[in-house]
Image (tube, helix red, strand yellow):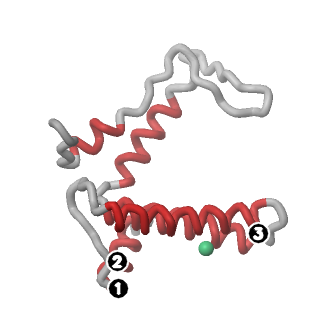
């Protein structure tokens, strides 16, 4: 079984008659705002339990964020797995050729000279997105 939530979330959207698109598409401002609100609600729920827990609540709220994020991608016709792969590629390029790691004082990994930024626009164009004005 695929470990991606994409298939599960697609099943949910089908079962409940929610929007699902096959090609990256700008949606109505109302729908876009609604999806943004759903995601903000779930992110706020993560923040509520992030420090005090309990751990099972944190796990649930994190999963809710991912589930809603995949749903929002599906509503917009975005294959989020491919976008995540591109983000991962860019993040891994923060590693120097000799394995050097640059860190900020708080531990955040920084970009080195070999960093190559994600090209999410290219990923979406491969999925069939035609940007405005193109
Ligand atoms: Mg929740």
Check disc 3 and report its element: helix, strand or loop.
helix
Q: Quadrant of ligand 1?
A: bottom right
Task: Tell me whether the residue at label 1 lies in contact with that at label 2, contact meaning CB atoms closer than 8 angstroms.
Answer: yes
Residue 114: give x, y in percent of width and height: 50, 17
Pointer 1 local density, CA inside 10 Å: few below 14, some 14–19, many at least 20: few
Seen in the picture, residue 28 relative to 16 is either above or below; the reply is: above
| The C terminus: image quadrant | top left
Point out the image quarter for the N terminus. bottom left
Compute the Cα span from label 1 to label 2. 5 Å
Q: Residue at x 47, y 61 (%)?
A: 36
Considering depth in this image, is 6 or 105 the residue closer to the camera? 105
Find residue 126 and report its image quarter: top left
Query: Quick one: 24 or 1, which is closer to the camera?
Result: 24
Residue 88 lies, in percent from the top left, at 48, 40
Residue 13, numbered label? 2
Distance from the alpha carbon under mark 1 to that under mark 3: 30 Å
Q: Who comes first in sequence, dot 1 or dot 3? A: 1
First-in-chain label (3 vs 2): 2
Quickly name the residue at label 3.
55
Mark 1, ligand 1, within 8 Å: the answer is: no
**Image disc number at residue 49:** none
Quadrant in the picture for residue 8: bottom left
Number of the front mark, 1 or 3: 1
| Crowd tier of the residue under label 2, counting other residues whose Cα lies within 10 Å: few below 14, some 14–19, many 20 or above | some
Residue 16's tag is 1
| Residue 61 on image: x %, y % | 64, 69
């Amino acid at each position: 079984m695929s470990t991606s939530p994409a298939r599960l979330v697609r099943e949910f959207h089908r079962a409940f008659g929610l929007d699902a698109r096959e090609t990256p598409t700008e949606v109505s401002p109302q729908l876009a705002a609604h999806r943004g609100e759903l995601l903000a609600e779930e992110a706020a729920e993560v923040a509520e339990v992030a420090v005090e827990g309990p751990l099972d609540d944190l796990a649930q709220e994190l999963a809710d964020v991912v589930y809603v994020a995949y749903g929002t991608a599906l509503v917009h016709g975005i294959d989020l797995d491919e976008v995540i792969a591109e983000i991962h590629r860019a993040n891994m390029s923060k590693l120097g050729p000799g394995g050097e790691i640059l860190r900020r004082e708080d531990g955040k990994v920084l970009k080195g000279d070999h960093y190559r930024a994600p090209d999410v626009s290219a990923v979406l164009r491969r999925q069939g997105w035609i940007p405005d004005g193109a």
